[in-house]
Amino acid sequence: MGLGDWIALAAAIFAGISGAAAVIAYRLQRRTQATSDETQLNDLVEKMEKALGSLDTGRTMTLKTFAANNVALVSLRGQALEATKVIGRPGIEPDWFQNMILAYAFSQTWDLANANRFWDRAVTVAEASSNHPAYLNSLLARAQFYYNRGLGNDWDRARQDFKTAGDALLEDRDRQGHDLAAHQAAMLYLQQAGFELDAEGETAAVPLVADAFRTANTIGAQWRRRTVLKAIEDLVQELQQSLGRPGLVRQVAAELSGTAPGLTAFPEDVAAMFASALTPVPPDGTLFGSADQSADEPGTGS
């Protein structure tokens, strides 16, 4: 080989080495950038989580809490929008929890288009990862979003998400046992009933409350069955009072008594509560007259 050939060969080898070094450097840069992006996203999610926790969502609102919430919401929206920029970079895929936080953040700041996108992503990511509890939580959170938004057929979408979650619970994919699955499913039906009371009233809510009682009554362990039934009873009575639905318990009792196996399937104290709700109250407000009255005389208040 002549001198020129050796020079050409050396140049080719040098170029090859330089090209390989450039590729390695590029990959290291991409990896470093991805790590930096992930860190930035994690930091933003942590800040959004704290901001969401700082919001005052109580029923009583004052000028002070209203102003504080507005400041927190402005900051929250800025962090959420910055996070979407990071997510748009190559190689960054938010996990289930990050999608949930972003969905909550956009929901609270009334950016419902972005909120809907991240609710969907949370459900999709959780289902794809076979994370059953995360999948159920995503479905229920998205259903709440649909109930609150009430756009088009949102309520039907919400009902479908609740149904999917309820069916998945009773399938017991995590092999937790029927008792725990029935406990969770009963509370799920009651949660949906609360939304339905606001959406369409007792007509839609009563069958769900009845399903909650029926499902809880299938729990095998007596202590757990009584505990769950008592919890549901207390919550239903609170719903009746707080939402101004005075006939709710009576309507649930009528629903349960009108279908097999009726009220006798429940423990005595629960059955007695329902029977009492179905007992008509006389116009004077008394259930029984005094012992020395005749049956034809009106009762007198004590």
Image: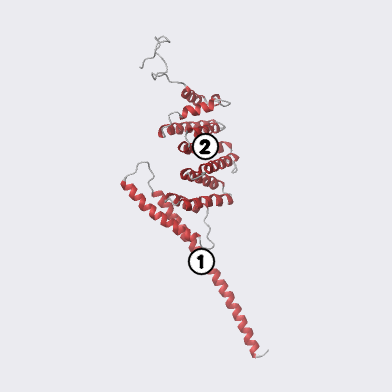
Up/down of 266 relative to 109, above or below = above
| Frontmost residue, 63 versus 135 | 63
Specify the quadrant of the image occupied by residue 182.
Answer: top right
Up/down of 72 relative to 258, above or below = below
Residue at 57%, 72% (x, y): give it. Answer: 23
Residue 187: % across, % down: 51, 37
For the C terminus, give its image quadrant.
Answer: top left
Question: Which disc is residue 121 wearing?
Answer: none
Q: Disc 2 or disc 1, which is closer to the eye? A: 2
- Left or right: 180 with respect to 104? right
Residue beneath disc 2: 189
Up/down of 183 relative to 290, above or below = below
Instruction: First in sequence, mark 2 or 1: give its number.
Output: 1
Amino acid at pointer 1 = Thr
Residue at 51%, 44% (x, y): give it. Answer: 154
Residue at 64%, 87% (x, y): give it. Answer: 6
Residue beneath disc 1: 32
- View extreme (right): residue: 1
- View extreme (bottom): residue: 2
For the N terminus, give its image quadrant.
Answer: bottom right
Amino acid at pointer 2 = Tyr
Residue 254: % across, % down: 51, 26
CB contact under 8 Å: marks 2 and 1: no
